[in-house]
Amino acid sequence: MSKTYKAYVYKGFERFWHWTQAFLIMFLALTGFEIHSSYSLFGFETAVDLHSKAAWAFIVLIVFAIFWHITTGEWKQYLPTTRNLKAQIEFYITGIFRNAPHPTKKTLISKLNPLQRLVYLGLKVFIIPVMVISGLLYLFFRYPQSGSIKSLAVENLEIIALIHTAGAFLLVAFLIVHLYLITTGHTITSNLKAMITGWEELEEDEPDTNEAKQ
Ligand code: HEM
């Protein structure tokens, strides 16, 4: 059993961004699927109003998060790697159920395992931009604004609504898997505690292979 040490893994802004984003995505899903007519909760008009407000808050948060990732260099955490990717997938499918060791070690320079890197990068460069762009097009189709912005008004909603809804399903699927994976750290709550307090017990050992690769 290797020694552990306490490390400050998630900084203040990072935790604020993570939890605000989590709340906003869940709230956007909640109001969005009401707009989609999946259920009735706030009432359609209120749901639309809340969805638009949360969407603008989400866009502001994204702008700050992009700035933070660039200025701190933390964007490098998301550089994809295939090293240990197969081992990580095998760990989640079988290893985890027979108490096998985690195939990758978390370090400050490499906080994400290869699977997380790929999935989070996909979220950042594909799904979230798709949601924001289709959402804005939807917004300007439904509510063409006055003046120059009016020219953005979209002619046909169907394809935009389909893309926006498909993205929403993908995000909800991600959330469900993410909630399960939160419990798969060194203890059932260690990942959650780390994202709340910033501090986590990391294993002291020979340098991680991912880290060495960077
Ligand atoms: C910046 C991001 C977003 C913007 C600007 C945005 C905007 C919009 C707008 C304008 C509508 C249509 C409202 C109406 O019918 O009047 C809508 C619908 C919807 N949104 Fe979003 N949204 C965003 C993010 C999200 C996210 C993150 C989710 C889910 C996790 C989501 C889920 C939905 C769903 C399910 C619908 C109903 C689609 C339909 O049935 O046609 N949205 N969104």
Image: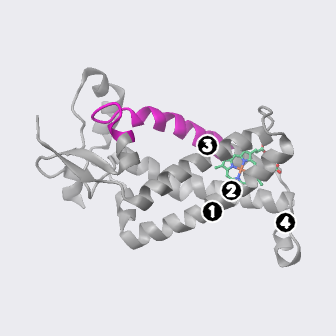
Does the residue at mark 1 contact the one at mark 2 (Cβ under 8 Å)? yes
Position of residue 160 measured from the top left corner of the image (x, y, whole percent): 76, 52
Check disc 2 and give the amino acid type. Answer: Ala
Mark 4 and mark 2 lie on one chain; the one further toward the N terminus is 2
Q: Is residue 213 above or below residue 196?
A: below
Q: Which residues are magenta?
A: 166-192
Label 2 Cα neighbours within 10 Å, binned few <14 / some 14-19 / many ≥20: many
Check disc 1 and give the amino acid type. Answer: Ile
**Closer to viewer: mark 4 or mark 3:** 3
Which residue, given by chain and number where applicable, does mark 3 sit on? 26
Instruction: Classify the position of the N terminus by image quarter.
Output: top left
Label 3 Cα neighbours within 10 Å, binned few <14 / some 14-19 / many ≥20: some
Cβ of mark 1 under 8 A from ligand 1? yes
Q: Is residue 96 above or below residue 66?
A: above
- How far apart are the alpha carbons under marks 4 and 2? 18 Å
Label number found at residue 55: 2
Label 1 Cα neighbours within 10 Å, binned few <14 / some 14-19 / many ≥20: few
Q: Residue at x 79, y 42 (%)?
A: 35
- How far apart are the alpha carbons under marks 4 and 3? 27 Å
Q: Is residue 157 above or below residue 99?
A: below
